[in-house]
Amino acid sequence: MFFAKSDRAAPEAERRGEQRSRMLKGGTLSFNKGYGALECVVRDLSAHGARLRFGDTSAVPQQFSLRVGTGGEWRNAEVRWRTMTDVGVALG
């Protein structure tokens, strides 16, 4: 049987002030004055925010420095939301 309408729900309203670019790049978090580090996958990135993916977000601190890729610059990041596997951050 053919249906003209999609069975999927409408996407949530966009809450961000700017469009993020989808990507799949490695990222590095540095915290605790450089003594702590974690790796992640950067899924979305804009000038002022990012969505980061982890195996588990319980070890991700509230504030840290983030570098996207191996040659990117370090930027201050603050967690705005988190799920079991993803973290949304504001970039300074």
Image: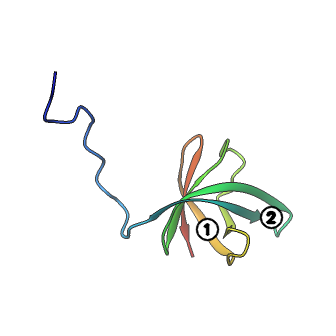
Residue indicated by mark 1: 77
Q: Is residue 36 above or below residue 17?
A: above
Tell me the tag on residue 65: none
User: Observer-nearest residue: 4 or 79?
Assistant: 4
Rounded to the nearest angstrom, the CA distance separating label 1 from label 2 is 13 Å
Report the label total.
Answer: 2
At x 30% / y 48%, what residue is drawn? 12
Q: Secondary structure at mark 2?
A: loop
Q: Quadrant of the N terminus?
A: top left
Q: Quadrant of the C terminus?
A: bottom right
Labels 1, 2: front one: 1
Q: Is residue 88 left or right of residue 16?
A: right
Q: Residues within 10 Å of mark 2 (few under 14, many from 20)?
A: few
Q: Give how far across and how far down residue 36 sits, in percent.
A: 82, 60
Q: Give how far across and how far down residue 34 sits, in percent.
A: 83, 68
Q: Is residue 81 left or right of residue 14?
A: right
Which comes sooner in the sequence, label 1 or label 2? 2
At x 82% / y 69%, what residue is drawn? 33
- Identity, as a three-letter code, of the amino acid under mark 2: Asn
Q: Give how far across and how far down residue 19 sits, in percent.
A: 38, 67
At x 15% / y 36%, what residue is drawn? 5
- Residue most extreme to the right: 35
Q: Give how far across and how far down residue 44 sits, in percent.
A: 50, 60
At x 72% / y 62%, what residue is drawn? 29
Q: Secondary structure at mark 1?
A: strand
User: Observer-nearest residue: 16 or 42?
Assistant: 42
- Identity, as a three-letter code, of the amino acid under mark 1: Ala
Residue indicated by mark 2: 32
